[in-house]
């Protein structure tokens, strides 16, 4: 366990892409400890309708990595077309993030552990209330998993681009697609170095509205 205060843990749990150690294996016990922390997260109606698929098999990870890369390429093409249409160029920060995201896309299948958080049912055709209830359960559990991973010297990143091919991923993982929704794919690895800093953010008063908008 890293020597972090709660505030340090919350302010330094980053999306780790470039600093994932692709060579060092992750002990199963560490993943199980993080999942036990995830189980303690609040969930709608205390239904605890989570499921986590943990993938360590090299062949399966490579198959998921290929699907993620396809989703990344589709996403990048869409972004490029929107920016061209708007006549704008990417900022320095956007280019920096893109480089790290490209690295992850190129190596997703090499990450030692991939965790796919899921929940029961499909959201197709449901209203905002029903959808919010489902996301409001899986998101806290997954974030708790990611915080627990950070406390144990592991890096993670919330990704969703494999969901461009969710049905194919379901086939790879034997997930019953019509009954279970995949929420994300979380790469998990030991980090290269343990020091992470709070990220720059907009001033608080630019995003907070007291009493009314």
Image (cartoon, rainbow, N blue to C red):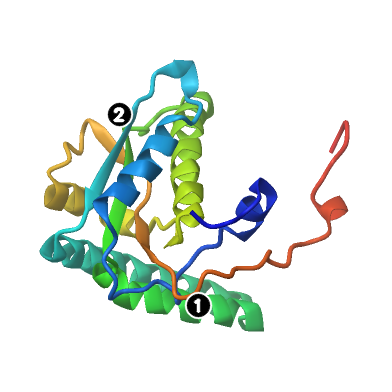
User: What mark, if any, has residue 170 been given in the picture?
Assistant: none
Q: Is residue 160 left or right of residue 56?
A: right
Look at 47% across and 77% down and name the residue there. 100
Look at 25% across and 72% down and name the residue there. 110
Give the quadrant of the C terminus.
top right
Mark 2 or mark 1: whose residue is earlier in sequence: 1
Q: Is residue 66 left or right of residue 10?
A: left
In percent of width and height, residue 201 lies at 74, 63
- Work out whether residue 50 or residue 7 is closer to the camera in this orientation and state it: 7
Q: Is residue 142 left or right of residue 31?
A: right
In percent of width and height, residue 42 lies at 51, 26
In percent of width and height, residue 141 lies at 45, 37
- Work out whether residue 141 or residue 211 is closer to the camera in this orientation and state it: 141
Q: Height in image: 8 above or below 123? A: below
- Secondary-structure class at tag 2: strand
- Secondary-structure class at tag 1: helix
- Work out whether residue 50 or residue 41 is closer to the camera in this orientation and state it: 41
Q: CA distance from mark 2 to mark 1?
A: 33 Å
User: What mark, if any, has residue 98 been given in the picture?
Assistant: 1
Disc 2 residue crowd, few under 14, some 14–19, many 20+, Cα 10 Å:
some
Q: Which residue is mark 2?
A: 120
Q: Is residue 56 left or right of residue 183?
A: left
Disc 1 residue crowd, few under 14, some 14–19, many 20+, Cα 10 Å:
some
Q: Height in image: 146 above or below 40? A: below
Q: In which quarter of the view is residue 65 placed?
A: bottom left
- Work out whether residue 19 or residue 25 is closer to the camera in this orientation and state it: 25
| Residue 91 in sight from this viewpoint | no
Look at 41% across and 78% down and name the residue there. 102
In percent of width and height, residue 184 lies at 37, 50
């Amino acid at each position: 366990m890293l020597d972090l205060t709660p505030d340090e843990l919350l302010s330094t749990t980053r999306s780790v892409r470039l600093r994932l150690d692709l060579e060092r294996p992750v002990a199963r016990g560490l993943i199980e400890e993080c999942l036990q922390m995830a189980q303690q997260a609040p969930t709608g109606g205390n239904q605890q309708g989570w499921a986590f698929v943990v993938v360590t098999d090299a062949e399966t990870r490579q198959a998921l990595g290929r699907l993620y890369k396809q989703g990344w390429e589709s996403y990048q093409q869409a972004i490029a077309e929107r920016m061209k249409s708007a006549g704008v160029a990417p900022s320095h920060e956007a280019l920096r993030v893109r480089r790290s995201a490209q690295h992850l896309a190129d190596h997703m299948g090499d990450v030692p552990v991939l965790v796919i958080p899921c929940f029961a049912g499909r959201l197709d055709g449901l209203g905002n209330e029903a959808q919010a209830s489902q996301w409001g359960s899986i998101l806290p559990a997954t974030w708790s998993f990611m915080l627990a991973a950070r406390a144990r010297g592991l890096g993670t990143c919330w990704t969703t681009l494999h969901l461009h091919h969710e049905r194919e991923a379901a086939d790879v993982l034997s997930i019953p697609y019509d009954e279970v929704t995949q929420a994300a794919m979380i790469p998990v690895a030991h980090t290269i170095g343990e020091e992470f800093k709070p990220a720059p953010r907009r001033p608080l008063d630019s995003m907070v509205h007291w009493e009314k908008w």
